[in-house]
Image (cartoon, rainbow, N blue to C red):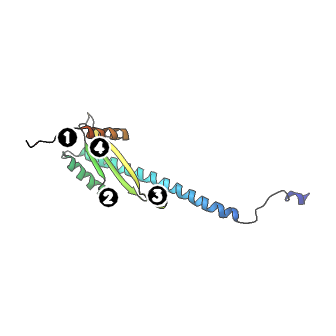
Amino acid sequence: MAKDLYKGRQMYQGPWLFYILIPIGAVALMFLVDLGYKYYNEYILNRDTKEVLYKMLEQENLSTQEEYKTFAKKKFEELGYEETADITVILKDDYIVLIYYRNYYSVIGELITKNKKVAVARYKGYTNEYKEAVVEEYTIEEEDELYSEEENTPVVIPSNK
């Protein structure tokens, strides 16, 4: 009876199963790390963009779009960002829009698509009736409306007659 106890079990004798599972696990781990790094970059960029926008709203001496953009570039450089060319500041009647695009390294992007991954932070800020700074996320639909307004604005070309 004791000899039949172990006879029905199937044992693997070679390491071939592990030779197959290890590369599959490594690729899955690489995708998970890449996805986690994407969320980490987006979180850090959103946090810093909100902070810069709060500081922009606290400033009383800024009036033009270029002054706001220069101030935002300076604050992003103080936070440790090196690429500050992709900052967009738009002044509307009621609020300020701050959009910042930042490239980050992606293993999957470098190996497969050869494209750089981009994290985007879009926020709008305004002061309410109590003179408090309010920062909200700026949605893609609002951005599309903003660009369509710019395209539909007629351009007046003076004639030389």
- Looking at the image, tell me whether mark 4 or mark 2 is earlier in sequence order: 2
Work out how far the residue at label 1 is from the one at label 2, CA to CA, in angstroms: 33 Å
Answer with the quarter of the image where residue 141 lies. Answer: top left
Residue found at x 76% / y 65% = 13
User: Which residue bears the numbered disc 3?
Assistant: 113
Work out how far the residue at label 2 is from the one at label 3, CA to CA, in angstroms: 23 Å
- Looking at the image, tell me whether mark 1 or mark 2 is earlier in sequence order: 2
Q: Secondary structure at mark 2?
A: loop
User: Which residue bears the numbered disc 1?
Assistant: 155
Q: Position of residue 140 (x, y in %)?
A: 37, 41
Q: Exactly how many numbered labels are in the figure?
A: 4
Dot 3 alpha-carbon crowd within 10 angstroms: few under 14, some 14 to 19, many 20 or more: few
Question: Which three-letter amino acid code belongs to the residue tagged 3?
Answer: Thr
Residue found at x 46% / y 55% = 37
User: Which residue bears the numbered disc 2?
Assistant: 83
Residue found at x 76% / y 62% = 12
Label 1 or label 4, whichever lies nearer to me, is 1
Question: Which three-letter amino acid code belongs to the residue tagged 2?
Answer: Glu
User: Which residue bears the numbered disc 4?
Assistant: 97
Circle 4/circle 2 CB separation < 8 Å:
no
Circle 2/circle 3 CB separation < 8 Å:
no
Looking at the image, the residue that sits furthest to the right is 1
**Viewer-nearest residue: 39 or 57:** 39
